[in-house]
Amino acid sequence: MSKVFAIVAGEASGDQLGAPLIKELKKRYPDAKFIGIGGDKMIKQGLESLFEMERLSVMGLFEVLSRLPELLKIRKTLKDYFIANPPDVFIGIDAPDFNLPLAKMLKLAGIKTVHYVCPSVWAWREKRVEKIKLSVDTMLCLLPFEVDFCNKHQLNAKFVGHTLADKITIEKQSDYARKELAIDLESHVLCMMPGSRQSEIKRMAPLFIEAVNLIHKEVPFLHVIIPVANEKRKLQLNEYLKNAKFDYQIIHQNSIQALNAANVALITSGTAALEAMLCKTPMVVSYKANWLTYKIISKLLTIDYVSLPNIIANKPIVKELIQDDATVDNIKNEMLKIMDQQNQLIQIQEFATLHKTLIAKADIQAANAIDNLIKPI
């Protein structure tokens, strides 16, 4: 009987992890079936997606509330389907608030469960790990220190690194990316990434665009590239870009190509910062949450940084402009600083060192851990 893998990803970064994992699992199980929720990349690898991944892409304590009935309905539909048609394993990719409760219900029904991307329990609400243990048979960790944290709490964990760390070269591939995008090799290129979720773009895009308008006055030959997660986000972003006074180029999905082509990047906190780090693109990270969401979470945080490069390094490599510090003037000033070549070189050298710590053949390691879980005893 062929294997059945249930996989649920909730946003573009999860789709990016899920697609090569499916590809690797297909090498081992050519007749396997993959079913759940994913984006274009996972679907291209053969996933049957029961819902649009966009429906799960929501962030923030209070932003979730307006979508809660729909999210609960989707989760119940998946639970009922997977219990009626048990897969060999359920793999939740990130989206912990959605995936972990679903994993718990499936685990109680006797289904093996894996969670890919360790939730940031080491950053806030550490006691959550006790509930996670009830939901997950194996945790797949992107960052080395996460395994020690999980093991301390008797949660089975495996460090797999990041699939992008394996694929992206240590040396920046700027010239190749610019040729692919038809950008002059001498241009000063800024990659602007105001988020992959609707709520993020609504909050951050006007701020970013106004700041880049001011930067453009001081760097007149600036070329801006903007990768978007999907067509819906492109349409949303186009409304804000009506106020842009700079030349820009929108790229569908290919954030790595955009970051490789860029001299510098302006990024919302999240996976995009990790991507920029791996591409050796100097950056400024800026983010604003719903004020009440931020007030609650900031009191619970136990770490000093929010961007992944700084968290991994445990020091301030990247400038973070968060909440009240996320102003047009602050963004403009910090971006102009990072356009200085000496400041860029410092970040690039740090990024190369951090990149090496995440190289671990992630797709193979993740598939091995799943193999070990579903093998007959």
Image (tube, helix red, strand yellow):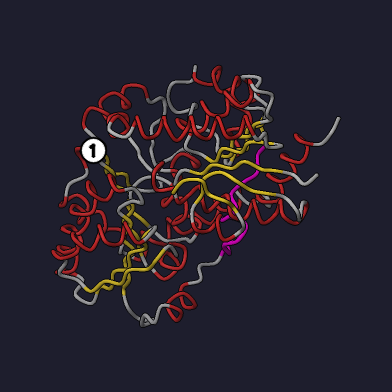
**Which corner quadrant of the image does residue 223 belong to?**
bottom left
- Image coordinates of residue 315 in percent, x first then y, are 43, 40
- Which residue is at 21% across, 41% downward? 325
Label 1 neighbour load within 10 Å: few <14, some 14-19, many 20+: some
Q: Nearer the viewer, residue 115 or 105?
A: 105
**Which corner quadrant of the image does residue 236 belong to?**
bottom left
- Which residue is at 48% across, 29% downward? 76
Mark count: 1
- Which residue is at 39% across, 57% downward? 229
Mark 1 belongs to which amino acid? Gln
Judge whether residue 160 is colored magenta. yes
Secondary structure category for the residue under label 1: helix
- Image coordinates of residue 44 in percent, x first then y, are 57, 61
Q: Residue lying furthest right in this view?
A: 377
- Image coordinates of residue 304 in percent, x first then y, are 38, 32
Is residue 376 left or right of 302 when viewed as pictured? right
- Residues drawn in magenta: 158-170
Query: Above or below — where is 186 with respect to 230?
Result: below
Judge whether residue 38 is colored magenta. no
Label 1 sits on residue:
323
- Image coordinates of residue 308 in percent, x first then y, are 45, 43
Is residue 129 left or right of 299 when viewed as pictured? right
Is residue 16 left or right of 201 when viewed as pictured? right
